[in-house]
Amino acid sequence: MRFIKHLKTILKHRHAVIRHGFKAGIGFQSLFHDFSKFSFIEFSSGAKFFTDGKRSPNETERKEYGYSKAWLHHKGRNRHHFEYWTDYNPIERKIMPVKMPIKYVKEMFCDRVAASKIYQGENYNNSHPYEYFIGGKGKRFIHPDSSDLLEKWLLMLKEQGEKETFKEIKKTSSY
């Protein structure tokens, strides 16, 4: 039964991202959103650790093992996650966040809004994605420009709604 529930959650989320992606001007790109969730390692972990469809199975897997194999696989294959965008900086001599291309910040926005809608269900409102973002702001390892742009769009969603925000996102082509 968890297999079916997990599959339904993934598909519901993907379809929401695709709908948002067309509104954001990245329709074709959004058609490929989260394909890695259908890989054996991600799907089997997701089904095994599926709880209620209100939180990520990765959280439950982390509690079990201290890390999530599914997440490590996922973030390394999906460029809409800021965790993908780190590299060795030869000047600083350490791993540093790298500025994300706009098209992936757009997909990250769509992903966060869709995830909030799925996890919040009928309790969702346009402030949820912004509140979630602000709650973890000091803990993220993300390039400041990418973070600022995402925050700008999430705040706009909260204050002006989807229609105006997606119109703004669609016309954005640079930082």
Image (cartoon, rainbow, N blue to C red):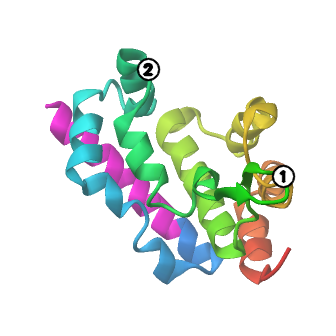
- Read off the residue under disc 2: 66
> Of the residues tagged 1 and 2, which is closer to the observer?
1
Q: Tell me where residue 145 appears, x and y as whole percent.
A: 85, 60
Q: Is 92 on the left-hand or right-hand side of 122? A: right
* Residue at the spot 34% in from the left edge and 44% down from the top edge: 9
Residue 54 seen = no
Q: Tell me where residue 140 appears, x and y as whole percent.
A: 73, 39
Instruction: State how far apart marks 1 and 2 are (Cα).
Output: 29 Å
Q: Is residue 145 magenta?
A: no
Question: Looking at this view, is 165 or 135 the one in front?
Answer: 135
Residue 106 seen = yes
- Packing grade of label 1 (10 A; few <14, some 14-19, many >=20) is few
Range of residues picked out in magenta: 1-19
Which residue lies most toward the top here? 64
* Residue at the spot 85% in from the left edge and 50% down from the top edge: 159
* Residue at the spot 55% in from the left edge and 77% down from the top edge: 22
- Packing grade of label 2 (10 A; few <14, some 14-19, many >=20) is few
Query: In which quarter of the view is residue 33 placed?
Result: bottom left
- Read off the residue under disc 1: 92
Q: Which quadrant holds the C terminus?
A: bottom right
Disc nearer the start of the sequence (1/2) = 2
The residue tagged with tag 1: helix, strand or loop?
Answer: loop
Q: Tell me where residue 152 appears, x and y as whole percent.
A: 85, 56
Q: Is 127 on the left-hand or right-hand side of 7? A: right
Q: Is 18 on the left-hand or right-hand side of 105? A: left
* Residue at the spot 73% in from the left edge and 43% down from the top edge: 141
The secondary structure making up most of the magenta span is helix
Which amino acid, mark 2? Answer: Gly
Q: Which quadrant holds the N terminus?
A: top left
